[in-house]
Image (spheres, helix red, strand yellow):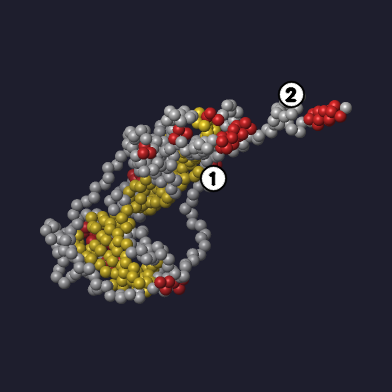
Amino acid sequence: MGRVMLLLLLGVAVGSEVRLGTGDSRASGAVTICTCDLSPAICDLNCCCDPDCESGDPASVFSFCLPGSVSVRSQVCLYGWLLFRSNSPYPTALIPASPPRTPELFCVLPVDPSLNYFVAPQTVDATNFSKLADKWRAFSFSPLSSPVPTFPDFYKADDPVLAVSRSGTVGVLIQPAPVGAQNLCSDSNPARFLRSSNTSCQREIRNLSDSCLADPWLSARHYYQNISVFRVPKDVINGTALKVELTGPVPDSPTLQGGRCHNVVSQVVYTVLYNGTQGITNVSVRFALVNASGARLQQEFEVNYQASSRDRTRTPCDLQNVSQGVPGVTPASPGERQTYYFQITGSVSAPASGLRRSGNPGYLAGLPVLADTGSLSAPSLQGDGSCSRRPVQFGVNALSGCSIRGELAETCESLRTRAYNVLLGEPWPRQLGAFGNGSTLRIPIIYENCTDQAVGDCKTGCLLPVFLRTQILWAEVGLLSNPQAQIQGARFRFSCRVVSCLDVTVLRSQASFTDITRRGPPPRSHPGITAREPLDFFYPFRTSGSAPACAGPGPVFALLVLTVMLFV
């Protein structure tokens, strides 16, 4: 090892062209596991190790390579002609000459990645599931004690604008925004201080006759009535808030006439006046109304910020009559510059769904958990109150649910089956995929069902499953440099209670993920260097490698004998 280190230093001193830690393409190897190859038979974007990409050099085609798709090796290289012999305890490699006239490279890997690995996870079954789950503490939705929130003295740029409803609930001023492939409106997007923006999204109208008068987001009153905005965040403590003012006349409420819903909101424009750190001084709103008869409604939401020191008068832009020559569009009445009427037609088609992995091979956070029935799903509540399904995402702890109601003539067995179908989906999953790439390795689901009590009827009450706790144990396996998430066990535990069939019963589902990864022993430390004396004056009476420097008095004794002989 000493000679190797000496030659390395020599190469740096005398070879001006020697590159230590070179980035030469010859010093990189292929990736054995392509974690970004999620689409079978399709070239994934920026996945430089995807075998479906026909390019011989994907790095020259893509703008960048995803992490893990190119091999990264920590090694020290120099020209091979500088070395005569290597006694390094570390792995070494000779990189051939490329192009031909360049010398070959001798590379030393000071760190062996095969020494850093995860210990094989424990086998999970019904006998030790509870023990492992208790040891690694699963996620819980139980309320925890939280500190009293504090509010700053003034708004900063991009802070959510705080608001309060008539009931006294503190929230934020909402600016609906599009989500998903169909650009449906989400009412969870807050308006942010000093960020003037415009959003456009679609509302889905399932039943026009019912939604016209029942859905609040169709009425203008929903966007200003009983809404007050806090001047500065600290006003939340004393409850002082500014009421949202209406610009112009009070808009009419939606009415259903001749199969069309009149006075439906199509545009909402908030104007917020502010005065530096003094906060918000005024909030006003104006609307544009339409007549709608289709299954979808396009809405626009705009928030504008203006300094209160400026002229507060604002001339509204005249709305262009873009409806000329368009069938199914009714122009606005004369004199109503802020109001125009049109009809929404057509629909947005959902994107074609194709086969896609949830990781390759290990799961990636946020992607669906695979089951023998497809993707594992949980019940979810739709806007109209009906039950739907949403995918269970790997590593995402979530709580969701919906409600069902029985009929008087329905039996307990039929209602119980319907409740199980809502919680589990149809058909019921029996196995989960251990990896996200759809491999044949499956993990059986441990079911802990309620006591079988299917007798009875809706008059006396039925024992129904009302809560499903889905607990998934997973661990990282493989090398530390490229860990892969693998599901080790899954348990579905039901909680039941007796309910009346005619009552609305809320069914809830909780999904939690517990990491039971065990790391292997630390890698071996760097070997020490055994110091040896070089060949010296006393050769051949003493060899350089016969003993350490402090082995005995041999050199001292020889020097004394030589001195005596000279003087005699």
Q: Quadrant of residue 299?
A: bottom left
Q: Secondary structure at mark 2?
A: loop
Q: Closer to the observer: label 2 or label 1?
A: 2
- Where residue 10 appears, as percent x and y from the top left, is 59, 35
Q: Residue at (42%, 38%) from the top-left corner?
A: 69
Q: Is residue 28 above or below residue 365?
A: above
Q: Amino acid at mark 1?
A: Trp
Marks 2 and 1, the one that precedes in the sequence: 1
Residue identifier under label 1: 136
Q: Amino acid at mark 2?
A: Pro
Image coordinates for residue 517, horizontal then vertical, percent: 52, 41
259 to the left or right of 432: left
Which quarter of the rendered picture does the N terminus lie within? top right
User: Quick check: 201 above or below 477?
Assistant: below
Q: Residues within 10 Å of mark 2 (few under 14, many from 20)?
A: few
Residue 540's mark? 2
Can you give x and y, in whole percent of width and height, for residue 28 in the image?
A: 46, 34
Q: Looking at the figure, which quarter contains the C terminus?
A: top right
Secondary element under disc 1, as helix, strand or loop, is loop
Q: Quadrant of residue 442?
A: top left
Residue in the foreground of this view, choosing between 208 and 186: 186
